[in-house]
Image (cartoon, rainbow, N blue to C red):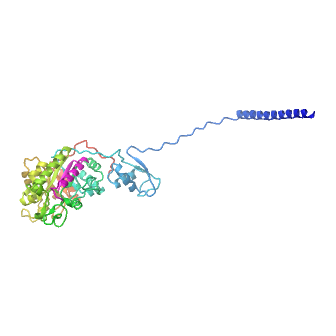
Amino acid sequence: MHRPQLNLFLVLGVAAFGFGVLHLRTVRAAAAQQAAQLLPAKATTTVAPLPLPKLPEPGTTFYEAHRGDTVISVARHYLYQTSYLTSSELAEAIRGSSPGVHGAFLKAGQQLTIPGMLDGPILEKSVVVPKDFEVRAIYLTGLMAGSDRGIKIVRRWHEVGGNSVVFDVKDSDGTVNIPFEHPLIGAHKTYIHDVPKYVRFLHSQGMHAIARIAIFRDERLVVSHPELAIKSKRTGQPWRENGKLVWTDPSRIEVQEYDIALAVAAAKAGADEVQFDYVRFPAEGDQKDAGFSFQKSHPEWQRSEVIADFLRRAYTTLHPKGVLLSLDVFGIMAWQRSVDLNHTGQDIVRMAKFCDVLSPMIYPSHFFGMDNIARPGDAPEHFIGESMDRFQKITQGSGVVIRPWLQAFAWRTKTYSPKYIEVQVLTAKTKGGIGFLFWNANNDYTKPYAAMPEMKTPKGQYFRGDDLPVGVKMAVAYPAN
C-alpha cells in the first residue's frame, strides 16, 4: 500500500526539478538578451589593403643583392640583357640608378635598379652608303673595340670629326673576335661579344662600321688545321715563312669558304662594309719551296688568278647584302714590279673588278729603299703623291674608289706630328683619293685628334665632310662620359 504513494512522490519531485532548471535557463537567456540590448554595438573595423609592390620603370628591372654580390658581378650577369657594351659602364649606370649604392660591395637584401634592359636581342641593319662615301676612319683591334677605352676612342673620334671605324673581326694571328660558328674554328674567346650591339653603338656615334678580316695569313687556323697550310715541296710538311707557320694555302677552297662565311656573319650583324686584308700569297720566305693546291687543280693558273677567282665569289656573295667590299693592298703594288705581282698575286687591275674600294697601304715609312730617298718616312708628300698617281692610272675606268691607309705612327720618321697628318690627308685628296684610314697598331690617335679640327676649318680643302644618312637608329641608355 505504501509503494504507489512513494512512486507518486518521486514523479512529482523529478517534474519540479526539471521545471526549475528550465526556468533558470530561460531567466539567464532573457538576462543575456537584455544586457545585449543595453550594451553599445561594436564599430565595424576596415582592414587597409597591403600596398602593391613597386614595379620597375620601363627599360629597367630590380635585383635584390645576395651575400657576396658586388656591383660589377651583378653588371656582368645582366650585361647581355642591356644596351650597355661593357660591365664597368653598366656598373656605373647601376650606381647612378640605385639610391644608396656607391662603392663596389653590396649588402644582402639591398635593392638595385638595372637600367638599359632590352626587350630582346638587338638586330642591327647595315646603313647603305655609296662606294664614294667619304670615309674618315681610325682602326681598332678587336680587344680594344670591346673595351671601355675603345668606346672612349670612338666617342673622341666622333667629337673631332671622324665618321668611320675599322674594327678587327679577324686579325692576321687568326683570332676571331666575334661569335662565329664554323667547323674549322670551334669554341673561341671573343672580345666583341655582341656585334649588332657594337655596330648600333657605332651608328649612334655617326660611324660607318667597317669589319676588317685578315684573310689568308691565319696562324690560328693553320696551326689547328695543318692540312690547310702551304706545303713544302721538299718535305711535304707545312711550309713556313721565315720559320713561322702562319700561312694557309690561299687556293684551298675550305679556307676561302671559311673567310667568306665570316664576312657574311659580319654583314648580317650590321656592318656597313667588309674589308679584306692579307688577301694575297706570302711575299717572304723560300718561294721556290712553296707548293699550292691550285698547281695541281689548275696548273695553268698564276697566283693572281687564284686571288681574282676568290674575290669574284666573295663579291657576288656579299654585294647583294647591301655592304661594301674594300681590299687592302700593298702600297708598293702601284709600281707594278713583276717580282711583287708574282709573289703576292695582287693584280690591281683584276682586283679592282671585284670590289668597291681599294685601300693601298701607303705609309711613307714603309717605302724604305724606294726612289733613292734615304728617309722615306720624312717624305710623306712624295710617296703618297706618287702612290696615288700610280693607283689612279692603273685603275682608270674601273670605277673603283681609291681610299688610302695613312700613317698614324712615328716609326722611321722624325717629323711625325699633327702637321704630318695634315700633309698626308691633303696630298691624298689632291691626287684623287676619296676619304682616308688612319693606322696605329696601338690605337693611339693623339696626332689625328689634334689635326682633325685644323682640317675641318677650311671647308672642303682636306675633306668634304660626308656623314651617315639622317635617321640612323640611336643606341639606348648610354651614359655620357
Indicate yes or no whether the magenta region holds residue 263: yes
Q: Position of residue 71 (x, y in %)?
A: 40, 55
Q: Is residue 199 left or right of residue 104?
A: left
Q: Position of residue 189 (x, y in %)?
A: 29, 57
Residue 145 occupies which quadrant of the picture? bottom left
Locate the N terminus and report the quarter of the image it occupies.
Answer: top right
Q: Is residue 323 left or right of residue 117?
A: left
Figure disc tally: 0
What residue is drawn where x is 18% and y is 45%? 319
Q: Is residue 224 visible?
A: yes
Vertical placement of 61 versus 412: above or below? above
Q: Is residue 163 visible?
A: no
Q: Position of residue 288 (x, y in %)?
A: 10, 64
Q: Nearer the viewer, residue 392 or 263?
A: 263
First to last magenta residue range = 248-277
Q: Residue furthest right?
A: 1
Q: Is residue 5 left or right of residue 187?
A: right
Q: Nearer the viewer, residue 106 or 68?
A: 68
Q: Position of residue 200 (x, y in %)?
A: 28, 47
Indicate yes or no whether the magenta region holds residue 291: no
